Amino acid sequence: MFEQALTYRNVAAGRKIACKTLVSAGLIALAVVLPQLVHLALGQPGGVKWLPMYLPVLIGGCLLGAKWGLAVGVLSPVVSFLLTSAIGNPMPPAARLPFMAAELAVFALVSGLFTKKIAENGLWAFPAVILAQIIGRGAFLGLAALTQHAAAFTPAMIWGQIKTGFAGIAVQAVLVPLIIIALRTVLMRDEQHD
């Protein structure tokens, strides 16, 4: 959707990359800060319940498309881990980092596959987000099943976390598409009047 808006405005290729880089960096920063705020307000269980890092990643996928969204999805937990490790409380924990990076990559990739449809009609953000959530959480569960003998996670443990996170998933299934629809209205405003 962002690409379409930039193309409509005849933004040069180099400037497109700069714009997408800035938006990606902003979303990654939000993916680092938002969990910290939720953990401060609600503690660690609040993070598992509300899944704050997922929100900017889903926005990134819908807004930026599969490739750029994928980068946001992978880099968000990695950057968060590196920055929070420097202050002594890594988030996500090292054992969870590869799983979370994989899960968020799937979230961003799947939602990013809908970006052109979302540019045409903002309501496509709803199936984009819901499908990304289902496939992403399924990927996390599947990865836990494949690695349960070598990793600290079992499918039962991950399923418990998935059930705990249903509230966050449900809120984001509504909130993210509404944010995307609002952004689409702003980004595509001039195009819609032609």
Image: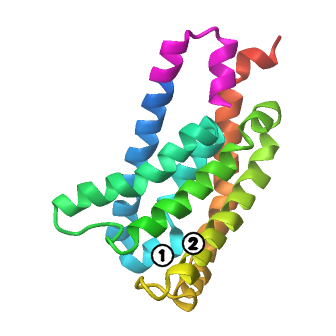
- Extent of the magenta region: 1-18
Q: Which quadrant of the figure contains the C terminus? A: top right
Closer-to-camera residue (10/123): 10
Q: Residue at x 50, y 28 (%)?
A: 20
Q: Is residue 187 magenta?
A: no
Q: Which quadrant of the figure contains the N terminus? A: top right
Q: Which mark is residue 109?
A: none
Which image quadrant is residue 41 in? Answer: bottom left
Q: Main secondary structure of the magenta part?
A: helix
Q: Position of residue 163 (x, y in %)?
A: 61, 83
Q: Is residue 37 above or below residue 178?
A: below
Q: Which mark is residue 48?
A: 1
Q: Which residue bears the numbered disc 2?
A: 140
For mark 1, does the 10 Å Cα neighbourhood hold few (<14), some (14 to 19), or many (20 or more) residues? many
Kind of residue at badge 2: Phe
Which image quadrant is residue 106 in? Answer: bottom right
Q: Position of residue 6 (x, y in %)?
A: 62, 18
Q: Residue at x 65, y 54 (%)?
A: 175
Q: Is residue 49 above or below residue 187?
A: below
Q: Residue at x 43, y 66 (%)?
A: 98
SS of the residue under disc 2: helix
Look at discs 1 and 2 and give the one toward the viewer: 2
SS of the residue under disc 1: helix
